[in-house]
Image: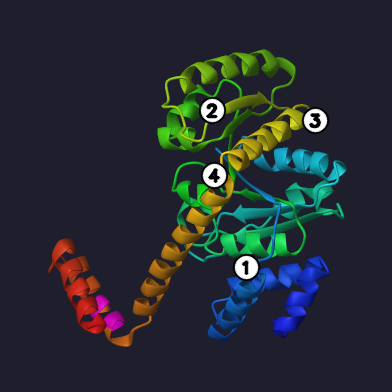
Amino acid sequence: MKRFSLEYYLDGLRAQNTVVLAQSITLVESRKRTDQDLADQLLNHILNQESKSVRIGITGTPGVGKSSFIEGFGTYLTSKGKKLAVLAIDPSSQRTGGSILGDKTRMETLSRNPNAFIRPSASGSTLGGVNNKTHEAILLCEASGFDVVIVETVGVGQSETLVNDMVDFFLLMIQPGSGDDLQGIKKGIMEMAHGIVINKADGDQEKLAKRSKTDLLNALHLFAASETGWSTKVELCSSLEKKGFDLIWQMILDFQHIMIENGLFQNNRSNQNVRWFENRVNFGLIQHLSDHTALKKNIKELRSKVQSGELSVSMATTEVLTIVKQLLT
C-alpha cells in the first residue's frame, strides 16, 4: 500500500477525512520498520491535542448481540449530534492469522452513517480480544474529531484488563437469565465493569430480563465499594425495539461527570498511558529478541529436544533465558 508524507496524514486527520483516518490506522498497524517510524512521528504530533471524547469498551459472551447493540446505540448517539468511531476487533485464525472482518456487514446501517466510522481489525495473537495497536487507533480517531470511541472485543474470557486499560467506561453485556453465562465470566470482569447491560429485553424475555437485573444488583452488593465513588449500574436494553439507549448513555455521562469531578478521569488516562508504555516496551523486547538469528537457532534446537523428550521444558526455558541474558550484557 502506498505511504504518504507526515503532513498528508496530519492534514487529513485535521480535516476529519475518514479515508485518511483509515490509512493512518493501517500505517500504525504495519510491521514495516519504515512505517513504524512514520507512525511514531504521527502519534507524537497528535499526542497533545485536546480531546473531550469518551472511550467505551464493550465486551460480552458470543451471541449476546454486541454488534446489534452497537448499531442501535451508535445510531442513537449520532442522532444526538455525536461523532462515533467503532473499533471492532474480529477474531483471528491462529493457523493463518486471517480474520472474518464482517463488522461492516453486521452494522450495515451504521456503516452508511456519515457521522460514524467503523474499523474492523484482526485481533492477531493478542490476548483479550484486542488488536495490539488499538490504543493508537483510538488516538487517531480522536484526532479526526470523533468524540465517542467504542472498542468492541471478541468476547469474554481472556485478558479483559487490556480493554479496561484503554477505555474510560467498561460495559459488560449479558442476556436475560444468563446464569450459565455468569458462571463463565470471571469475577474480576464483573468487578471491572462500570455498567452492565442486559440485552434482548423484549417480548417473552422482558420479564426474565427484569428478574436478571434484580439478581445482578443483589450480587453486585457483595462486591467491595469502588474508590471512585461509582457503583456499577445495570440497565435493560432491546436492540430490536431500540429501547434503553438513552438510559445507557446517561449512565456513561453520569460516570464521566463523577470521574471528572473527583479528578480521576484524566488521572486514569495518564495511568493507562504508563501501562501502555510498559506493554509496548515488553512487546518490543520480545519482538527484537525473536528476530535475533543466534537466539532463533538456539530456540529451534531446544524445541526439538523438548519435542523428543531429551530435555524438560523447565531446563530448556532456563537455557533460553541464559542466552538472552548473555545477549543483553
SS state under label 4: helix
Looking at the picture, the colour scheme in use is: rainbow
Specify whether residue 221 is in view.
yes
Label 3: which residue? 242
CA distance separating discs 3 and 4: 32 Å
The mark that comes first in sequence, 2 or 3, is: 2
The mark that comes first in sequence, 3 or 4, is: 3
CA distance separating discs 2 and 3: 25 Å
CA distance separating discs 4 and 1: 20 Å
Please give the name of the residue rendered at 67% of the width and 13% of the height, measured from the top-left corner. 207
CA distance separating discs 1 and 2: 31 Å
Give the number of the disc on residue 231.
2
Please give the name of the residue rendered at 80% of the width and 27% of the height, measured from the top-left corner. 241
Give the label, 2 or 3, closer to the camera: 2
Q: Disc count in the image?
A: 4
Label 1: which residue? 47
Q: Quick check: 289 above or below 241?
A: below
Question: Which quadrant of the figure contains the C terminus?
Answer: bottom left
The mark that comes first in sequence, 1 or 2, is: 1
Please give the name of the residue rendered at 42% of the width and 73% of the height, measured from the top-left corner. 284
Label 4: which residue? 264
